[in-house]
Image: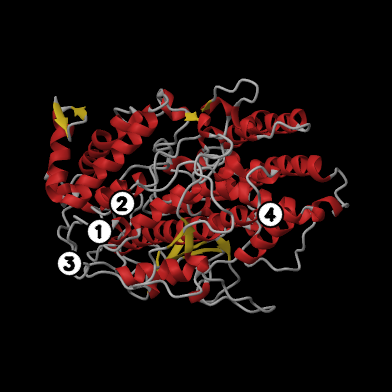
Amino acid sequence: MCDCFGSESADPETAQTIADVNERLDGFIKSMLKDERDKQIEQKEANNGKFDANILTFPAPYPYDSKDYPVIPLNIFDGEAPSGTKMYEIPKVDEYYGDISFFDDLCYYGKYSDGAFGYSFDENADPVSKDEFKDITDSDGLQDNLDAARRYFTGMIGTPVYGVTDVKKLQNPPPPILQTKLLNDWEEVDIKNLGNKNQILSALLGDTVEGDASDMWITLIAFTGFAAHRTIPMKADTNHPEAYFVNDTTFLSDYEVKPGYEKYGAAAYFDSKYHLKEIYLSDSDTLYKAPGKDVKGAATAAQWAHAKWAWKVSASVAIFLVEFLAHSHFREANGFIKAIRETLGDDHPIRRLLIPFTLGTVKCNRIFNEFLRENGLYHRCFAFKYKALQRLIRESMQDAPILTAGQQREVKDRMKYRFRLFRKKVKVMSKLPDEIYPIYGDLWNFWIQALELTEEYVGKLYGEDQKDDSQLQGDTEVAAFYGAILKNLKINEKYRLKKFNFINVITHFIANATIWNHQLSSAVSFVYSVDPDFTGLKIIGNNAKQNNVIQYAEYCLVSLSKGYMLPNIKPSTLINDNQSKPGWERVLADDDKLPITKAIFAKFFDKKLNGVTEHVKERNKKRIAPYFITDPNFLQASIHL
């Protein structure tokens, strides 16, 4: 046995694989990967895998002045942030977790960036190494190289973080940790026999795709997986005569990348049977057609494999940097929390309602902002040059232009932020069968439960009559809060303060902090697969079709950078010494409404969430692949590390 990195034991073959990978990694990646991994181990083991709700005290340990709380600018400007950029500022101090310590700022984030003791980094240099796993195994066998990558993952992350000794046997039987953490969830999906799974899928999918069965993995990602929310129907187009659906990230091509890498940006086109037919790549400005017997101008096998890889990487990058980081974290959650801070008193009942769904978000956004430093984690692990990375985040946070009737959104504006009520985000695909497109049904089911929580809670505070808005409008703090939300998120002022609108906006935030955060974060994660050919963060300029050794380590590091993301929405996942107000009920005020509000919370956090789990479990029996993103067993209550 060999002690690797001084923290975990591995069999000789695994230890040798880790050593071979480490030889190819620079000091930054090797050191930070270990540090981020060890943070997750510490977080997991702190309370035996449960979330300590005893942190919730009133008042909070780090209270703030609603009129003058400290903020810092996002690291998305070249030099000092210009005046009038309040949208690009985030709160500095988390009311429950405090500020980043001087030591962490200097010796951790400073070490891994342009700060003190920072590692050197030249973004204009070619990649240091393009070694693939075959250079470690000295074999061209696909299985040999896949096994090598899995050994590396198992030794570095799988065993120490998840307690998994063989990622190929996760579900047979599943270790206890997989009851609350998703890992390599598509390992047992049988691509070749999906059409034979049941009569419904057989009819929907029709004949299997000719040639490469991996085309169906693109279908899974685009309709059932992390990119499903980006797939939309398309109008008839003579340039794509077979296309019924498209998943497009070509806007990414406007942002410069480092030498040795291809530009991001791709569009995948699918027919009425959900088969992948074409992929357009921005870097080569070429439309590649799926290989087939009667396909005129079909791509070669190598071109097609590379096109699929470039699309997967582009989708992961667009979702992680634009939707997850810029839209969900920095614009929406940040705008919502600033509205809370500036308008609602510490003891306001609406603020108390939102504590489970805001806990730790300020700290989380602070950490992600540190990773955006020049020469830092995201500058290194994504292919964008630093100014391009800054511009992408900055422009993604800007408001998308308002369109007139019939006007089409330009490519350059497709990444910009626009508020869309959560229940409308994926409605355009709502008529697709659940077996193929599970995201709509599952998101809608969760939305309904959260909506009922908000309706009942608001009703008890401001009257049961949904048409009587007088009490709600008479609460000056709520009026100011709602007005701040409209301003921060650029919601049309025609949606004036009334119960219906207020309840929907609050429910939207709950959904964004829970299930939407989980959906977006899965784009760079270990949720679906841990294999190096599943998806990545860079497109190397050598017709690559999977991560090389360094890129795989970088992908693992960025996945770890999101924290352990401890599931904590269900009462069974919480540690709480307050028996009179167990679970999230401890945030409720001790007033005359407590028996009623406790009952409302218990109904949602226990009964309703258990019902969501059963809904997902039953629906998954008939689906093309399992989809657990909305299962409360795996959900955080807030955007939290």
Tag 4 secondary structure: helix
The one of 479 and 230 positioned closer to us in this rendering: 479
Q: Callout 1 environment at 10 Å: few (<14), some (14 to 19), or many (20+)?
A: some
Q: Which residue is mark 2?
A: 105
Q: Callout 2 environment at 10 Å: few (<14), some (14 to 19), or many (20+)?
A: some
Q: Which residue is mark 3?
A: 126
Q: Which residue is mark 1?
A: 115
The residue under the point 44% across, 36% down is 182
Q: Closer to the camera: disc 2 or disc 4?
A: 2
Tag 3 secondary structure: loop
| Cα–Cα gap, marks 2 and 3 | 30 Å
Q: Which residue is mark 4?
A: 505
Q: Closer to the camera: disc 3 or disc 1?
A: 1
Amino acid type, mark 3 = Asp
Q: Is residue 387 visible?
A: yes
| Cα–Cα gap, marks 3 and 4 | 47 Å
The residue under the point 46% across, 50% down is 93
Amino acid type, mark 4 = Val
Earlier-in-chain disc, 3 versus 1: 1
| Cα–Cα gap, marks 1 and 2 | 9 Å
